[in-house]
Amino acid sequence: QVQLVESGGGLVQPGGSLRLSCAASGIIVSINRMGWYRQAPGKERELVAAFTIGGSTRYADSMKGRFTISRDNAKNTVYLQMNSLKPEDTAVYYCNTFHRMDYWGKGTLVTVSS
């Protein structure tokens, strides 16, 4: 059974940084598509960053240069390093993978506010 557990969210001031973690079980992060999505209040869920099956990375335009997706294959964990955070980055951040079906974690809340 695939399980994704996010952690690392919290309250941060504008301009600050956070690193989110997604610990995976039942799936190997190094050979599967792994992504981070976010959903802000009143908005649809959107892609933040992802590893493709081939291992390349994709980023939403508004996150390029500020966010970095990475993974630790030994820990079977995917990370999202977020720098230069803005109030509009406030959202619940979800880890996602696809293996015959979509799997989602429960999400971790990131609040960017002074």
Image: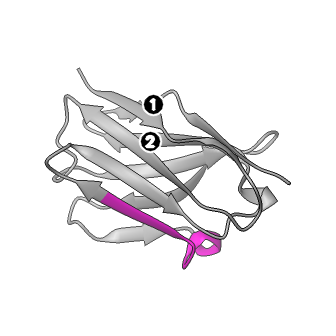
Q: Choose between 50 and 25: the one closer to the eye.
A: 25
Residue under the image location 25 percent in, 37 percent down: 99
Q: Residue furthest bottom?
A: 65
Name the residue carrying label 1: 105
Percent x, y for residue 105?
45, 30
Q: Position of residue 34 (x, y in %)?
A: 33, 50
Left or right: 30 as drawn, with respect to 42: left
Badge 2: few (under 14), some or many (20 or more) residues near its Cα, within 10 Å?
A: many
Residue 59 appears in the picture as rendered:
yes
> Which image quarter holds the C terminus?
bottom right
Tell me the tag on residue 2.
Answer: none
Read off the residue under disc 2: 95
* Residue visible at 13% across and 47% down in the picture: 74
Residue 45 can be seen in this image: no
Q: Secondary structure at mark 2?
A: strand
Does the magenta run of residues contain 102?
no
- Which amino acid, mark 2? Cys
Residue at point 38%, 35% (across, down): 102
Q: Nearer the viewer, residue 11 or 66?
A: 11
Figure quadrant of residue 45: top right
Return the residue found at the far right. 114
Q: Is residue 87 above or below residue 32?
A: below
102 or 57: nearer the viewer: 57
Identify the amino acid type marked 1.
Gly
